[in-house]
Amino acid sequence: MPWINACATDDIDEEDLIRFDHGSQTFAIYHSPEGDFYATAGRCTHEEVHLCDGLVMGHLIECPKHNGQFDYRTGEAKRAPVCVNLRTFPVKVEAGRVFIDIA
Amino acid sequence: MAKRDYSLQGPDARRAVETGLAAAEWYHTEVPRKVMKDLMQRSDAPAIRDTVILYGCMILFAGLGIALWPSLWSAPFWLAYGVLYGSASDSRWHECGHGTAFKTKWMNDVVYQIASFMIMRNAATWRWSHARHHTDTYIVGRDPEIAVMRPPELAKVILNFFGIIDVIRFFPNLVYNAAFGPTADERTFVPQSEWGRVRRVALVHLSVYVATVALAVWMQSVLPLMVIGLPRLYGAWHHVMTGLLQHGGLADNVIDHRLNSRTVLMNPISRFIYWNMNYHVEHHMFPMVPYHALPRLHDTIRHDLPAPNRSIAEGFREMWPAFRRQLAYEDFFLKRSLPPTAKPYREDLHQISPGTLTPAAPPATAIPAE
């Protein structure tokens, strides 16, 4: 699977995220306070709520439904009620565009 | 008339899953992302201020109560201490359980553990029960935190103003948890990885109660229990009063919090004790917004919500007659009018009647009351 052109870098504010859908899959793409970009599965591993309405605090994404938290850089579950880690995807930035490898 | 089965493992629980009511996508008022991000921002300052006031007042009132004991002059101080112990702990448990009260995680965790002890809830179990309450708010058979089941048992509701039903249920459960971990019902919403924690928390709570009772026996005085344990009875009334208003008399088995939750404007002392959970529709729609930002959230989305009740008394005048009508007809619920600026209720999403396998016609399942 080639890299997927997901969005422009300035589509996402620093310390925020957006939703990106590709086919039947849905993702969350993050812009960290340091200016780096990351991508994870879009839905919380707890109850399938999409993370796109959640709050990014530093390197944490907080689920909008139950306040579970993940480190979006590694996908690690950091706060109950989430127990299962979030899948992450490689990201690269070229010419002002964010690409994710969804393979 | 359909009979509701509130068991978490019963037919209504299975039906909620089959019909898609469980873990459904709920209605949300549209709020611009930038506005919502601002509302969700965390801060330590308001909660530190409120916690210093709360614990400072508790120490002051308990100290005066002990100093004046056993004179009747101690009574007002016990009553004030009791409300902070037996009611303010409910809202602290709630907000810190969400992790939104403080910005700093350990502060949320410390206040959560203390509040869980005071309100007599297992800190491990109830974190998960409340997650389910937010997933499946007032979905029969799914929500373990339905305060008043239908038909309402009003005698139990009244007894619980003094914490009696809660405490009677708590201690056998505490002993069970300490001996065996979560009960069968609790295991439906507490993940297995947390069962050991449930038992450890129960053992700690049980140890404190045993030590308190031992001290009371040694002192030949009820005084230690006036400080630990009994305030959950004599100070419970405020959290029961405000808690009943959250969902009482409103719809169940719907996926729009405007239909099953109530916002009530109230006096500043009650709002301090309740930590702004009187903005309850707003809290359920957007649980990531901290308590101190809920008044701003209310102003942001009030155009899309039923008008709030203007006082606790007005809320009870609306709710209590609904309870009484549910005694005769348990499918009765209040359906509040929306302002012209609001998006209408999606009636097609709210026609699953408890006790039936198929969607029911709205007139058969509810008598709307304006």
Image: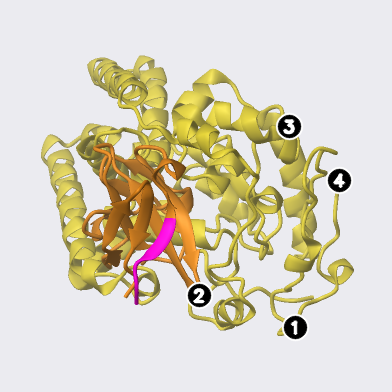
Chain colours: A orange, B yellow
Q: Nearer the viewer, mark 3 or mark 1?
A: 1
Marks 2 and 3, how far apart at CA:
49 Å
Residue A4 drawn in magenta: yes
Which labelled disc corresponds to residue A24? 2
Q: Camera-side residue: B66 or B58?
A: B58
- The mark that comes first in sequence, 4 or 1, is 1
Q: Residue at left 85%, top 73%? A: B361
Marks 3 and 1, how far apart at CA:
36 Å
Label 3: how many Cα within 10 Å (few below 14, some 14–19, many 20+): few
Marks 3 and 4, how far apart at CA:
14 Å
Residue extending furthest left?
A: B218
Is disc 3 placed on a helix, strand or loop? helix
Quarter of the image for residue A58 reads top left
Kindly identify which chain the residue marked by label 1 belongs to: B
Q: In this view, does B176 lie to the left or right of B17?
A: left
Range shown magenta: A1-6
Disc 1: which residue: B358
Q: Are marks 2 and 3 in contact (CB under 8 Å)?
A: no
Asked if marks 2 and 3 fall on the same chain, the answer is no
Amino acid type shown at disc 4: Glu
Q: Are marks 4 and 1 in contact (CB under 8 Å)?
A: no
On the image, the x and y values in percent for residue B215 come to 13, 40
Q: Camera-side residue: B167 or B286?
A: B286
Q: Camera-side residue: B263 or B315?
A: B263
On the image, the x and y values in percent for residue B112 come to 29, 42
Q: Which of marks 2 and 3 is in front?
A: 2
Q: Residue at left 36%, top 32%? A: B42
Residue B230 drawn in magenta: no
Q: In this view, does B217 lie to the left or right of B89?
A: left
Count all numbered tags in the image, as a single digit. 4
Disc 3: which residue: B314
Label 2: how many Cα within 10 Å (few below 14, some 14–19, many 20+): few
